Image (cartoon, grey):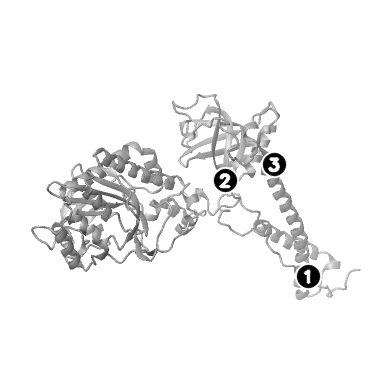
Amino acid sequence: GCPARGEMRLSPAPVLSLPAGSSCVSGGALRGQQSAPSITRPMQAAGSRLVQRAGRLLERPLLRPVGAASEKLFVCSLSAAVLCRWRRRHMSLLLRRAAAQASSTDVARLDPSQVEDSDAPLVGKYETISSKAEGVRELVPVEVLGTPSGPAMGSRIWLRARLATSRVKGKATFVVLRQNSLHTVQAIKFKSKEDGGESATAVSKFFKALPLESLVDVCGVLVEANVASCTQSNVELQIERAYCVAEASQTLPFLLADAQRSEADIEASQKTDRPYVRVLPDLRLDSRWLDLRVPANNAIMRVQAAVCRIFRESLAQRGFIEIHSPKLILGESEGGAEVFRTDYFGQAASLAQSPQIYKQLAVNADLPGVFEIGPVFRAENSNTYRHLCEFTGLDFEMPIKWHYKEVVAVIHSTLLEVHNRMEAEYATELAAVRSQFPSEAPKILPEPCILSWPEAMEMLKEAGIERDPMADLGTEEERVLGRLVLEKYGTDLFILDRYPSAVRPFYTMPCKDDPKFSNSYDVMLRGQEIGSGAQRCHDPAILEARCAELGVPTGPLGPYIEAMRHGAPPHGGVGLGLERLVQLYLGLDNIRKASLFVRDPARLSP
C-alpha cells in the first residue's frame, strides 16, 4: 500500500494554535511566577526531536523519496504528522495537569472553625469568610515572632500572611510568609517518620499549586533558626496545617520580586546573562494595590501617615485647632486660572486650590490658630516628576503679634520635629524605603535658616546664573540654590524670604519698607519648594488694592473682604504639600511614589 517513489501525497501542515491564556512570555510568568499553562518550551524541544525522527525515517529505503525537492516535501509532511500527534498528546497532558492543580486547590471548602477537628484535612481552602463566627482562633502577628514579646520557642501558633515565595524539593517545602508587607518569616515542612511522609506530601502539593500572593492561615511550631533572608531571622515555623484564605490569580501583572529591586541592582544585572526585569511605572500604577505590597512602597505610605500624625500632634500641642474647610467654592481661592470648574445648581463653582480663605476666616473667628490636613486640587497640565492634580495639603494659619517671622519659627520647629521623630520612631519603615531607594536623612539645623531674596539672587549670580531678579524661580534654579545653601550653611531645609510682590497671590502683605517685595516665603527642602506662606492682608484697603493691582475680581471674594472689615487680627500661615514633602524627605525621584492613588493629567483611575 506504499505509494511509488517520488509520488508521496502531501497534506497541508496543520496550524498549531496556543491555548487560550498562553503566551511566550507573560507579565506574570517571569522569574518563577506560577502562570497559565504554556506550550512554548515543549514546542522548542519537540522541534529538534521532529527533525531527528524524520532523519531516521529517511534512512529506510522504502520511504526515501527521489530528488532533493521531494525529500524536503517529505520531511515537511512527516514533521507535520508527528507534530499533530504530539500536539494531541500535549494538550491532553495540559488538561490533566490543570485538572490536578484545580483538584489540589478547589477541594471542598472548609469551615475555619472546624479545621482543627481530628478528621479535618491538614491542608485545604476555607469557605469564604463572611462573618459567620467571631474569635475563631488567635492569629499571632509575624513581627513579634522571635522577640521578647512574642510566643516562646516550641509554641504551637497560627498566623495569617501572604505567600511570598515557595520552594518544593521532593517532600521538603520551604515557604516565606509576608505579613503587612514589612514582616517575613520562613515556614518549613519535612518528611515525618510518624506518618511515612503523608503530611509532607500533602503540604508540598498544597504550596506547589498555590499561587504567590495568596493569603494563607498556617499552623505550626515555632523553633529557633537562622534565616537571614527574612525579617524574623532567628525563628522559623514548622508547618502542621495550612489553609488558603484568599487565592490570588495564577498570573499577576508583575512579580513583587521584580518590583522590589533597587535601580542599582537592575542596572548591574543588565551586564549579566540573566538581566532583571524592570517594572515600568505605568504598569505599577495600573495595579497600584499590588505595587503597594512592595515593602518600600508600603513603607512610604506609613511614612506619609507619620508625617501627618506628627504635624497634627505638634500643632495641637501648641494650641492649634484642626478644621475642615469646604472644597466646593464660589470663584477661585488663589485667583488663578488653574482650577477645576463645575456647576453648583446653576452657579459657577470650582474645587478649592487650597483652604486659604477659610483658614483666614477661622483665625478671624478668634480661634487661637488652625490647621488642616486635606485634599487640594490644581488643574495644572504638568506631566512632571513633582506635580499632581490632586494632593494632600498640610496647612496652618495663626495670629501674629508683631512680625511674620513668628510664623516662620513655627514652620521650622514643626518640620524639625517631623524630622527628629521620624528618624527615632520609624526606623523600620525608613530602612525599608532606603533599601530600595537609597538616600540619607536630610540635614536640618536647630534654628531656621532664612535666606532673603536679594541674597539668593546674589548667590545664583555668583554661580553663573543670569536671570531677571524679580521673576519667580525655575526648577533648575531652585536646585542650584539648594546646593549652594547646603554648601554654605550645611542645611537641606531653608526659608526663602521676601519674594517679589508681583509673583505672589493677592492676599499677600507687601513689605513696609519696599512694596516691590512681600512678607512672603517659600519652604525649600533639598533644593525644591515644598510649600509657600506669608503674612496675609488683614487690612481691607490693602487687600482691595492688591486685587486691583493683580486684576483679581472682587465679586466672588465679597464675604472674605467683608470679614476683614470686622476687626481681623494680623495673621499668617503656610501651605505644604504632603506628597512632595515625603518625596523629598525620602529622596524619591518621582512624586507618584509618594501618592496612594495618583491623580495627574493622564490618570483618573484607579
Between label 1 and label 2, give the one nearer the viewer: 2
Which amino acid type is marked by label 3?
Val
**Which type of secondary structure does the marked residue at label 2 adopt?**
loop
Which amino acid type is marked by label 2?
Leu
Which amino acid type is marked by label 1?
Phe
**Residue neighbourhood size for the residue with mark 3, other residues' Cα within 10 Å, grouped as few (<14), some (14–19), many (≥20):** few
Query: Is tag 1's residue or tag 3's residue first in the polypeptide sequence?
Result: 1
- Residue closer to the observer: 330 or 571: 330
Please, which residue is most extreme toward the left here? Answer: 513
Image x and y of residue 477, in percent: 23, 61
Residue at point 32%, 65% (across, down): 338
**Which type of secondary structure does the marked residue at label 3 adopt?**
loop
- Please indicate whether residue 473 sits to the left or right of residue 120 in the image: left
Is residue 205 shown to the viewer in this render? yes
Query: Is tag 2's residue or tag 3's residue first in the polypeptide sequence?
Result: 3
Q: Quadrant of the N terminus?
A: bottom right
Between label 2 and label 3, give the one nearer the viewer: 3
For marks 1 and 3, give the CA distance: 49 Å
Image x and y of residue 256, in percent: 50, 48
Instruction: Check whether the beta carbons of the residues at disc 1 and disc 3 lie within 8 A of each other.
Output: no
Identify the mark at residue 107; answer none if there is no mark.
Answer: 3
- Residue closer to the observer: 106 or 69: 106
- Residue closer to the observer: 572 or 605: 572
Identify the mark at residue 212; answer none if there is no mark.
Answer: 2
Image x and y of residue 191, in percent: 65, 31
Query: Is tag 1's residue or tag 2's residue first in the polypeptide sequence?
Result: 1
Residue, disc 1: 74
Instruction: Check whether the beta carbons of the residues at disc 2 and disc 3 lie within 8 A of each other.
Output: no
- Residue closer to the observer: 403 or 348: 348
Residue at point 31%, 45% (across, down): 440
